[in-house]
């Protein structure tokens, strides 16, 4: 009995869904709307943007490495040019 009730409820529900779908299609004529980008074009643009961001990130990493190695060279040069104090034991 419950199964029969469920099947009737399901049939009514699906009928209402179809009615709502038809009403929506009548009120909103979507056939005249032209898509600006195709799916492939959209994917291409997203991938291009990711490549651009990846390139910027690698440039930042290279610049950071260059600055840190230059800093180490300066520190090494300044420490080697400083006279070392020698303690003379008497």
Image (cartoon, rainbow, N blue to C red):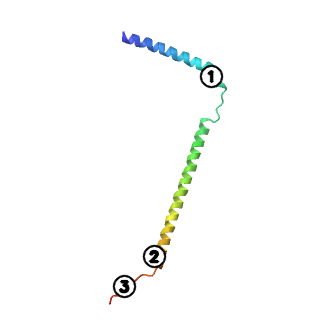
Measured in 3D between alpha carbons, the distance from the residue under mark 1 to the one under mark 2, in whole angstroms, is: 77 Å
Q: Is residue 84 above or below residue 5?
A: below
- Classed neighbour count for the residue bearing mark 3: other residues with Cα under 10 Å, few (<14), some (14–19), many (≥20): few
Residue found at the far left of this picture: 90
| Residue occupying the point 57% across, 42% down | 46
Name which quarter of the figure residue 36 lies in: top right
Q: Quick one: 79 or 37, which is closer to the camera?
A: 79
Query: Which of pointers 3 and 2 indicates the residue nearer the eye?
Result: 3
Dot 1 lies on which element? loop
Name the quarter where the C terminus is drawn.
bottom left
Q: Position of residue 25 (x, y in %)?
A: 60, 20
Dot 3 lies on which element? loop
Measured in 3D between alpha carbons, the distance from the residue under mark 1 to the one under mark 3, in whole angstroms, is: 93 Å
Residue beneath disc 3: 87
Q: Is residue 10 above or below residue 59?
A: above
| Residue occupying the point 39% across, 84% down | 86
Residue beneath disc 1: 28
Residue beneath disc 2: 79
Query: Which of pointers 1 and 3 indicates the residue nearer the eye?
Result: 3
Residue found at the far bottom of this picture: 90
- Classed neighbour count for the residue bearing mark 2: other residues with Cα under 10 Å, few (<14), some (14–19), many (≥20): few
Check if mark 1's residue and mark 3's residue have beta carbons within 8 Å.
no
Q: Is residue 88 above or below residue 60?
A: below
- Classed neighbour count for the residue bearing mark 1: other residues with Cα under 10 Å, few (<14), some (14–19), many (≥20): few
Measured in 3D between alpha carbons, the distance from the residue under mark 3 to the one under mark 2, in whole angstroms, is: 18 Å
Residue 53 numbered tag = none
| Residue occupying the point 42% across, 13% down | 7
Q: Earlier in the sequence, mark 1 or mark 3?
A: 1
Dot 2 lies on which element? helix
Q: Is residue 8 above or below residue 62?
A: above
């Amino acid at each position: 009995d419950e199964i029969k009730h469920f099947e009737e409820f399901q049939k009514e529900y699906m009928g209402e869904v179809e009615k709502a779908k038809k009403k929506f299609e009548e009120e909103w004529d979507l056939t005249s709307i032209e898509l600006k980008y195709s799916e492939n074009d959209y994917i291409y643009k997203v991938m291009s943007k990711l490549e651009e961001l990846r390139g910027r990130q690698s440039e930042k990493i290279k610049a950071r490495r260059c600055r840190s190695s230059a800093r180490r060279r300066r520190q090494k040069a300044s420490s080697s040019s400083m006279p070392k104090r020698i303690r003379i034991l008497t």
